[in-house]
Amino acid sequence: MLQTLMIKLDTSKEQHASLLETMHQFNEACNYIANIAFERKTANKMELQKIIYYEVRDKFKLSAQLTIRAIAKVSEAYKRNKTIKPEFKPIGAIVYDQRILSWRKLEAVSILTISGRQTIPIRIGEYQRVRLDRIRGQADLILRNDIFYLAVVVEVPEASKFDAVGTLGIDLGIVNLATDNDGESFSGKQIDTVREKNAVLKANLQKTGTKSSKRHLKKLSGRESRFHRDVNHVISRKIVAKAKDTKQAIALEDLKGIRKSVTVRRTQRSRIHSWAFFQLRSFIEYKAILVGVPVVLVNPRGTSHICPVCNHNERGNRPNRDNFKCVQCGFSGNADHIAAINIAARAVEVNQRIVAYNEVKANTGIETEHSYKPPISIVGN
């Protein structure tokens, strides 16, 4: 499995200025190349190189390989959408390959700038340290909050998946970010508090409109998303550890497109649009792959109002957000807990159908109209 590691560069004032100037020149060159590409309606990297290589080198004082990387960046961006001209911000990322970047063990990196080669110390934790010997391909130079980082891709070995003896169903939500079928919940109250506090602060700063308030707004930028990310890392780590310790597979709802399909009150819109459920799901998935825990994605339809005892399916089974009570058999409980139970049961049913489908296909070599074609994905397969 491929992972991206963020390696912090411990730059001096002079090195920081040199990297920043290189980044500005590189992206200015990208905008210049984008104009030519858009005028000539070509995204072909080799064709652009023939047309503009020497001109870009002379005009922007870039090295040969930085010029090649700038042409490649424009080509890739233009290929994605040929109806618009690509535009690049002054602090857009620079892609470095092995010709213009090399590692000095685990202590420093040698990186090319318009001022020549710079050997810059790096700061890494133990998590990055044990993975740096698996670096693959290129690295992106990124500027965040006036700090330079290298985003490097590493190959991490995947553990062999174990044979699960049970299924841990996970219901993802907003009030409770995650609830499993054992009844353990991870509350979203802390995130709500931070979101509401930041919303009030941002509104007041925007209303003020002074230079100081704008600087404060810039400082706040990304703080809430970083907080969400940290919370999701903590929750996903606990869920995967529990599944691994109990030898269970993890069952998750496939919530793709959920924001388009749900209708909420105006007061709830910001809450649902800031709900980082996909991030939490992706964290669970990749952490599970690393330790060999199977993950199954199931259709979420009806999981919140089906009775796990009598299978009666009616929206009236869930009279409010927090409670579940079956109108047919009277079974009741916490609504999120019941949903997690249903998700786990649905994953078991899906796995049984997949086994049956594979047996039919193996025995007959054909797919009949009665064969089961799984509508879900099994992560890690």
Image (cartoon, rainbow, N blue to C red):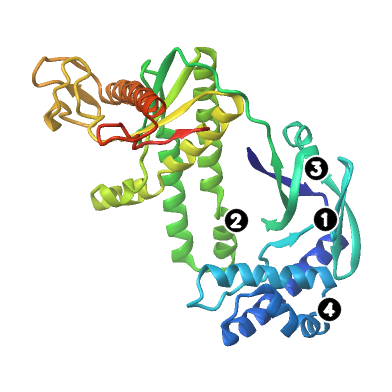
- Where residue 244 sits: x, y (%)? 54, 17
What crowding class fits label 2: few (fewer than 14 Cα within 10 Å), some (14-19), or many (20 or more)?
Answer: few
Q: Which residue is mark 2?
A: 219
Q: Give the number of the disc on residue 207.
A: none
User: Which comes before the other along the chain, label 4 or label 2?
Assistant: 4
What crowding class fits label 4: few (fewer than 14 Cα within 10 Å), some (14-19), or many (20 or more)?
Answer: some
As drawn, 325 above or below 296:
above
Whole-angstrom CA distance, mark 4 to mark 2, is 33 Å
Foreground tag (3 vs 2): 3
Q: Secondary structure at mark 2?
A: helix
Foreground tag (3 vs 1): 1
Q: Nearer the viewer, residue 58 or 17?
A: 58
Whole-angstrom CA distance, mark 3 to mark 4, is 30 Å
What crowding class fits label 3: few (fewer than 14 Cα within 10 Å), some (14-19), or many (20 or more)?
Answer: some
Q: Which residue is mark 4?
A: 61
Whole-angstrom CA distance, mark 3 to mark 2, is 23 Å
Q: Amino acid at mark 1?
A: Gln
Asked if labels 1 and 3 touch by Cβ distance under 8 angstroms, the answer is no
Q: Residue at x 49, y 25 (%)?
A: 294
Asked if labels 1 and 2 touch by Cβ distance under 8 angstroms, the answer is no
Q: Secondary structure at mark 1?
A: loop
Q: Which residue is mark 3?
A: 123
Q: Which residue is mark 1?
A: 98
What crowding class fits label 1: few (fewer than 14 Cα within 10 Å), some (14-19), or many (20 or more)?
Answer: few
Asked if labels 4 and 1 touch by Cβ distance under 8 angstroms, the answer is no
As drawn, 261 above or below 327:
below
Q: Residue 7: in sight, yes or no?
A: yes
Q: Amino acid at mark 3?
A: Arg
Residue 29 falls left or right of residue 101: left
User: Which comes before the other along the chain, label 3 or label 1?
Assistant: 1
User: Which comes before the other along the chain, label 3 or label 4?
Assistant: 4
Whole-angstrom CA distance, mark 2 to mark 1, is 34 Å
